[in-house]
Image (cartoon, rainbow, N blue to C red):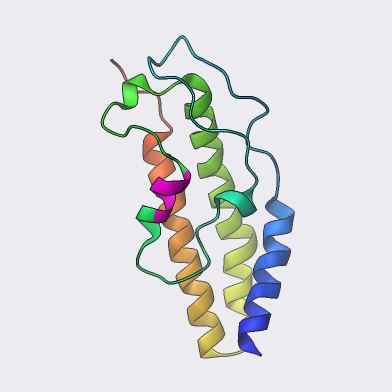
């Protein structure tokens, strides 16, 4: 029963955040690499479900950018990464925090807290990578 409540809360929260991150994939004059990211909703980029402990690998799989050369990341990819950070913040404050506060039991609260932590990895990773870097 708790498992169903968690999914219902996250589904409702995610639906309020399900907005496109960018309209098109295009090359950039800022970065030297071609764009590799495309428009996605929060549901598509979310890593908050599943087992805790592997969030960074999940984020890297969903955002396959070359982190060894951030100056070469295209402008459109930087825009997508920046918006992913913003939408991750919205998910935390608009969905996870209220759901954790309203959780009816320790198991539900723990599962939501684990999802929030995984969401923080998404947000923080993109907070670092979404800023333009000097060549």
Vertical relation: 24 (above or below) 29: below
Residue at 41% in and 38% down? 64
Vertical relation: 116 (above or below) 27: below
Quadrant the N terminus occupies: bottom right
Residue 67 position in % (x across, y down)? 31, 34
Residue at 59% in and 46% down? 87
Q: Is the magenta stretch mostly helix, strand or loop?
A: helix
Residue 50 position in % (x across, y down)? 49, 70
Q: How many numbered badges does the structure rendering display?
A: 0
Check if residue 61 falls in the magenta segment.
yes
Vertical relation: 22 (above or below) 71: below
Residue 85 position in % (x across, y down)? 50, 43
Residue 99 position in % (x across, y down)? 63, 73
Vertical relation: 134 (above or below) 109: above
Residue at 63% in and 35% down? 39
Q: Which of 102 and 82 is in front in this view?
A: 82
For this orientation, the residue located farthest to the top is 29
Quadrant the C terminus occupies: top left
Residue at 57% in and 90% down? 105
Magenta stretch in the rendered image = 58-62
Check if residue 22 falls in the magenta segment.
no
């Amino acid at each position: 029963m708790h498992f169903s409540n968690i999914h219902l809360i996250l589904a409702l929260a995610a639906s309020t955040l399900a907005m496109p991150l960018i309209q098109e994939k295009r090359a950039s004059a800022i970065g030297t690499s071609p764009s590799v990211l495309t428009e996605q909703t929060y549901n598509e980029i979310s890593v908050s479900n599943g087992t805790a402990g592997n969030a960074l690998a999940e984020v890297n799989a969903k955002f396959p950018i070359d982190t060894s050369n951030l100056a070469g990341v295209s402008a459109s990819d930087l825009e997508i990464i920046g918006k992913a950070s913003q939408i991750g913040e919205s998910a935390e404050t608009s969905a996870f925090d209220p759901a954790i506060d309203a959780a009816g039991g320790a198991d539900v609260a723990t599962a939501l807290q684990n999802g929030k932590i995984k969401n923080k990895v998404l947000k923080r990773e993109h907070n670092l990578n979404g800023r333009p870097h000097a060549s």
